Image (tube, helix red, strand yellow):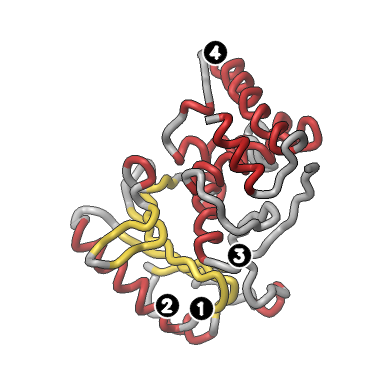
Amino acid sequence: MEQQFYKWLIRRGYSETGAAKGYSRAINLVSKHYSEQTGSHFDVYSITDQNIISQIAYDCSKSGKYSEFGDLQHGRFRAATARYSEFFVLGNEVSSPNQSDEIVQDVSNNDDSQDENELNLPQSNFAYERDLQTTVCAQISELFPGYKIWGESSQGVEYSVGKRRIDVLLEHIESGDLLVVELKSGFADFKVFGQISMYVGLIQKQFLNKTISGVIIAGSIDESLRQACEITDKIALKVYRMSVELEDV
């Protein structure tokens, strides 16, 4: 897996003798760190669960329990685990480069004190929703604490129900409640409310004994969507914004 990660980084434009080499080797040092912390053998490259990979990336992030370790060597371990989580989500495919974008949760449907215009967002921070999906899935532990991607082997990504595909289906680790995530790389209006409401209904029929809710993540939220969401507490609204990290290549 180390060699696959290395080659993936090169295809993404990272230097063969610089960041690609450094990040792929850094994962082995992350494994060593976890082994020392847990007192048992730990090998990141042997893990097959995206939720665990996402948790490791979060642990090494600026908000994680190993943030000091993540900061070492100019943030190499933090950057390496973040890139490895993206690689893991994509399954070795190449997505459009996104300059190490991070998603930030901002707006919920019961908080009308925030105005999207104040965020100075570009019309679309992500060229494709697939890029947004990849970044969100790589940071589930950070963006949705207490949740994981539903099912085995990330079955909740592009989850199929009623001849429809849900962007991401999350499960609360303790309660088992399900969260339907609908992604829009740019502008979202009232039409998205109908779409996610249908998805929530379809999931509710499939999981009768679970509590189902939904969240729309978009680059910007139209007032018509805000108004539509006022009739229910089952659908939350969030906008994303980018922060840029500079990495040595």
Viewer-side residue, 196 vs 114: 196
In percent of width and height, residue 46 lies at: 47, 26
Residue 56 is left or right of residue 165, and the answer is: right
Give the mark, 3 or 4, whose residue is nearer the N terminus. 4
Q: Residues within 10 Å of mark 2 (few under 14, many from 20)?
A: some
**Amino acid type shown at disc 4:** Gly
Residue at the location (69% across, 37% down)? 20
The answer to whether any part of residue 140 appears in the image is no
Q: Which residue is mark 1?
A: 188
Q: Secondary structure at mark 1?
A: strand
Query: Which label number is shown at residue 192?
Result: 2
Residue 248: percent from the left, percent from the top?
80, 42
- Residue type indicated by callout 2: Val
Q: Quadrant of residue 231?
A: bottom left
Task: Assess whether mark 2 and mark 1 are in contact (beta carbons under 8 angstroms).
Answer: yes
Point out the tag, 2 or 4, that comes first from the N-terminus: 4
Which is more N-terminal, label 3 or label 1? 1
